[in-house]
Every structure is written in structure tokens, then in C-alpha cells.
Amino acid sequence: MGCSTGKKGDIVAVRDMPSPDGRHICTVFGETFHDTTGYRRHIYLRRAGEKLGYPANVYLVHVGDDVTMSWTSPSNLLVKLSFETPHAVPSTTNISGVCVTFEEINQRTPH
């Protein structure tokens, strides 16, 4: 994952995904330290109108792992993860009144 001095890196690639009813926002953002290893991504869930926080309050996606998210209803968020190295899939949780469910997906096999 690279060296970290405990300092906050530069925030990049910010993407907001509002819930279907617009009451919540799931934000994915990268945090880079400008090295050659890539950057980790934070998943942060908040109510509409609240400021984006730091660090992730849903999940921190490590360099080499991948993630996709989708709202399955106004109060349910599905987070699909694929891992470069095996990890435990997080348990279902509730953040700001939203049920967050995690699921592992397989990475594509090279042809």
C-alpha cells in the first residue's frame, strides 16, 4: 500500500452517487500521495446537504482492489468488491439510516 506518514493525501477523482430519493449521497474519492503505486479510494456516505468527510466511513478500497456501488432502493446501498489478494467481505452495516450490504465479485480472468 506504500508508505504513509499519517498525513492526508490529495483528494482526486471525486464521484457522487445520490440515492434515488436524493436524501443521501454516496461519494467515492481517491487519495493520492503522488507515488507510482496508484491510490486507494474512500467510500463515504452522508445525508444530502452534509459536507464530505474524511476518512471513509463505509469502506477504504486498497490499491489493486476494485469496487462498484449501486443503490437498490432509497435506503439500501450495495457495495461490490473484488480483491487483488483475499480479504474478508465486511458485514452489512447501517450508516445514516442506510443499510449498506457488501458482496464479493470475481475479477475478470485474463484471456
Image (cartoon, rainbow, N blue to C red):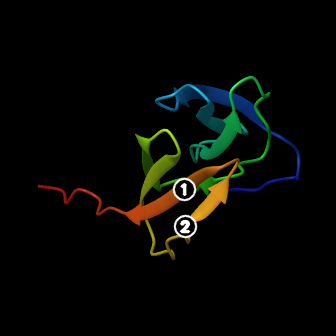
Kind of residue at disc 2 = Thr
Residue 14 visible? The answer is: yes
Residue 65 coordinates in the image, percent (x, y):
47, 56
Q: Which residue is mark 2?
A: 92
Above or below residue 92? Residue 70 is above
* Image mark for residue 111: none
Image disc number at residue 100: 1
- Name the element at disc 2: loop
Chain-order first, disc 1 or disc 2: 2
Q: Nearer the viewer, residue 43 or 66?
A: 43
Q: Which residue is painted at 84% across and 41% down in the image? A: 8
The residue under the point 70% across, 47% down is 96
Residue found at x 32% / y 61%: 105
Q: Amino acid at mark 1?
A: Val
Position of 20 with respect to 38 (left or right) is left
Question: What residue is at 61 percent from the left and 32 percent from the top?
Answer: 25
Q: Is residue 62 above or below residue 91?
A: above
Residues 8 and 90: in front is: 90
Q: Counting other residues with Cα less than 10 Å from the Cα at mark 2, is it few (<14), some (14-19), or many (20 or more)?
A: few
Badge 1 marks a residue whose secondary structure is: strand
Image-based side of 4 in relation to 65, left or right: right
In percent of width and height, residue 32 lies at: 68, 37
Q: Are marks 1 and 2 in contact (CB under 8 Å)?
A: yes
